[in-house]
Image: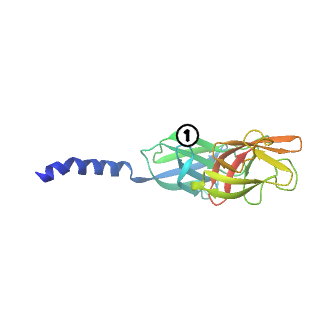
Amino acid sequence: MRVLTNLPLVAFMSIAASLARAEPTAFQVNGADGKPVEGAVVLICARGMRGMVADGTTDASGALSLDVAHKPEYDYAVYAPGYRLFERREARLSDKVDVKMVPCKPSDRLAVLDKAGVSLFGGTEPDVTLSTGYTGGWQFDIAAGPGVLIGKSDPDQALLRRINVGQSFVAKKGKDRVTCKLLCGIPKRGPLIEY
């Protein structure tokens, strides 16, 4: 009799295990011209771009295989220098995912914010630098360079030190202002910002 009462529990556990089983997902990353993009970083995150699930870099043929469960919905992003960020939100992954990267236009301003910093106002000195990364690559501490104020919406009112993926901040130097958005965290490099 005891065996029969445990049967539903065993069945539920085996179904749950099969749903969460990691399976290979083959990414093929090509440019708009159809040529493979080598060195593209693929990030798979929990919904909201929080919590890294898997990441990797494409090879010379633009290919990368990552083992992830196919049942949950993920956010994923693909970044390569010279291309716009490719993003998909709340997507279910399958055995094969084809990604077509679009080249950046001259007006597109993307940068990986690292400890060396980024010049937002066109000078040679960094205006914003990365201080520390936190919580699975989705929350970061940033620091302002000399003469620069940074804030959530008004740098004159409240200074900003920590920012999450998806949030924006404003940098001010003299009378010039630049709005920046943190798009995603690039593993071992820093956050990708658009400004």
In this image, 5 relative to 26: left or right? left
> Where is residue 109 shown, x and y percent of the image?
76, 44
Q: Is residue 183 above or below residue 188?
A: above
> Where is residue 76 shown, x and y percent of the image?
56, 46
Residue for point 64% across, 42% down: 166
Residue 185 seen: yes
Direction left: furthest residue: 1
The amino acid type of the residue labelled 1 equals Arg
Residue for point 56% across, 48% down: 50
Foreground residue among 192 and 87? 192
Residue for point 75% across, 54% down: 143
Foreground residue among 147 and 23? 147
Q: Secondary structure at mark 1?
A: strand
Foreground residue among 136 and 62? 136
> Where is residue 70 shown, x and y percent of the image?
43, 47
Foreground residue among 78 and 32? 78
Residue 36 seen: no
Residue placed under numbered mark 1 in the picture = 89
Residue for point 51% across, 55% down: 65
